[in-house]
Amino acid sequence: MEQQQIKQLVSNFMKKYFSVVDEISEFNLSFIESNELFEPQIDYTKLRRFIDTAVNNLKALDPKIAEGLLGKLYNDINGLTNFELDFDKKNKVSTTIFKRDFLGGLKIYQDMVNEVRLTESMRDKFQSLMLATETQLQNMGQPKTKDEINEYK
């Protein structure tokens, strides 16, 4: 493979792999712009306990509060937070992502893995055949009776 092809493969993989993150980010930015909101300067993941407590206290005062816009925004925050936590957890080890997602998606790599499995299977088959043949040879041993001697002639 040429270097340009490899760069293209990596670029395509990165676009595909992070497409969900891009979609969510674009949606949130367009929501902020369309509603003339300011871009948040606070990391809501650090304030999660505070927000949970505040919403729970408001729900205790008025259970219907969770049915309106506040409830929707709260659910959105929870959804985004859960998405971020899952994404971070899934992407902790870059070598796993490289092997599982990048290489796993390449046909040439899949073909090589299948070839390795086939070769290992053949090796195991030949090892068992060799073991069986060695056992037969050991069982043959030296002839002990005249009939066995005649059998070899």
Image: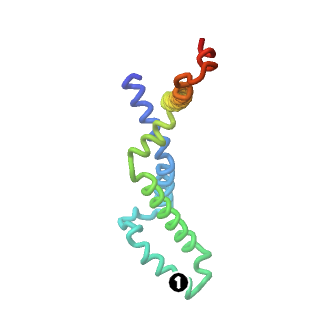
Would you say residue 110 is visible in this rendering?
A: no
Residue 75: name its quadrant: bottom right
Q: Residue at x 51, y 79 (%)?
A: 55
Residue 132: name its quadrant: top right
Q: Is residue 127 left or right of residue 42?
A: right
Q: Position of residue 12 (x, y in %)?
A: 46, 36
Image label count? 1
Q: Position of residue 65 (x, y in %)?
A: 58, 80
Quadrant, the N terminus = top left
Q: Is residue 88 above or below residue 54?
A: above
Residue closer to the observer: 153 or 102:
153
**Label 1 Cα neighbours within 10 Å, binned few <14 / some 14-19 / many ≥20:** some
Q: Residue at x 36, y 25 (%)?
A: 3
Q: Residue at x 49, y 28 (%)?
A: 112
Would you say residue 96 is visible in this rendering?
A: yes
Q: Position of residue 72 (x, y in %)?
A: 57, 69
Residue closer to the observer: 134 or 37:
134
The colour scheme used here is: rainbow
